[in-house]
Amino acid sequence: MKTIQIITTGGTIGMAIDPKAQGAKPTGFSFIRDNISLFSPYAHVQVDSYLNIPSPHMTLDHMVNLAQKVTHYLKQPDIDGVVITHGTDTMEETAYYLQHVLPKGKPVIITGSMSNQSEASFDGLQNLVHSVHIATLPESAPHGVLVVFQNEVHSPIHMTKTYPDRLPFFESLVVGPIAKRLKADEFEWIVPVLDHPQFPIQYLTKEVVLFTAYAGMDRSYIDWAISNKKDGIVIQALGFGHLPPAVLPSIIEAIQSGIPVIITSRCAYSATGTTYAYEGGGKHLEELGCILAQGNGQKIRIFLSMILEQTTNVTKVKAYFSQK
C-alpha cells in the first residue's frame, strides 16, 4: 500500500465556530485521525501539522517554506505523494507557485473546504479523502501539482476561485477540469498534461506589485511603485489589455527605469492582444515596452516574481511570457 504525506497549512478546513468570536477560527485537524478508516482503502496516511492559518495570511515566504517542506517529503523513498490542506482564498497562488518549483515525479495535491468543521455541510473530509485517492493514481504523477475540490481535479495553471459561497467554487476557465469523479472510486481524465516552465529557485526576494485598472485611473499608483523601487509591476488592464491615457507617462517612466510592466486583463476569461492601436490600446502598450500576458493578475504576479529570481533582462523576461 502507498504512503501519502498530508501537510496542513490551514484554511476553512482547519476551522470551527468559536462561540465567543461568533465566527469560524482555526481549531485543528483532529478530524483526520478520527476518520482514518476512510483513507485506509487508498493509502497509509501520515500527518504533518505544519500550519493552521487563514489563507489571506499566506505570504510568499510561507509558499517558499512550504515548497521546501514538500520537497523534503518527495525525496523520501517511502513517500508516494503529498496532499496539502489550504484555504481557498489564496489556494490558486500557492498551487501555481508549487507547480513551477517542485521536482517532478510524484503527485502533489492541494485541497480544502468551503464549510468549516462546525457545519453539517463540512466538505473538508470528502475533499481530503478524494485527494489521497488521487495522489495514489498513476495518472496524477505527470501533472505534478493538482487541486482537488468538489469531485473535480484542476491544474493550477488555469484554475481560479469563481464564487465565495456557492458552486462552482473553483473553475478552470480555459480548459476545464483535468479530471472528474464519475462514481465511487472512478475518475475520468479529460485534459492532457499541460506544459509549463520550471524554476530551480529556493526563495522569492523580488517585490512585484499588482494593480487593477479602472475608468479614470491616473498615474499615482505607478508613481508609487517607481518611487518605492518595486521590482516589477503587473496591471490587470481593461478589456483586451487597455489603459487610460493618464497612466501612460508613468508606464514609460517605469520601463525606462528598468521595471518590467506586465499587462493582463481584469476580465474573468483573461486575455490580451494587439487589436487596438489607439493611445493606451494593447498594440500601443506593447510598442511602449509593456509585456502582454495571458492569465489572471494574481498568478502573473507569482510568475514574474519567479522569473526575476532568474533574470532581470527584459528580453529574457519577455521570452518567459511567450512560452507561458
Image (cartoon, grey):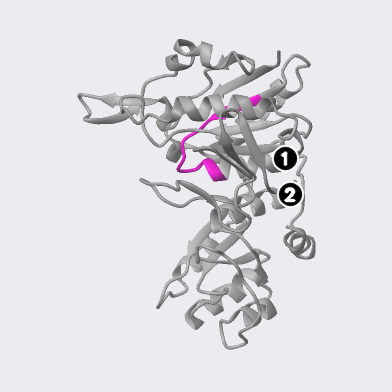
Which residue carries the number 1 mark? Answer: 143
Residue 277 within the magenta-colored segment of the rendering: no
Residue situated in front as seen by the camera: 186 or 324: 186
Kindly report the distance in space between the C-alpha atoms of the residues bearing marks 2 and 1.
Answer: 7 Å
Report x, y in % for residue 212: 47, 64
Hey, what amino acid is under mark 2? Leu
Decide if residue 62 is on the left or right side of residue 219: right
Picture quarter with the C terminus? bottom right
Q: Residue at x 70, y 21 (%)?
A: 73
Hey, what amino acid is under mark 1? His
Q: Residue at x 62, y 65 (%)?
A: 262
**Where on the picture, by quarter, is residue 129?**
top right
Report x, y in % for residue 28: 41, 19
**Where on the picture, by quarter, is residue 259?**
bottom right
**Neighbour class for label 2 at 10 Å: few (<14), some, many (≥20)?**
few
Q: Residue at x 33, y 28 (%)?
A: 25
Residue 196 tag number: none
Residue situated in front as seen by the camera: 116 or 209: 116
**Magenta residue span:** 82-92
**Where on the picture, by quarter, is residue 249?**
bottom right
Decide if residue 138 is on the left or right side of residue 125: right
Decide if residue 41 is on the left or right side of residue 212: right
Residue 194 tag number: 2
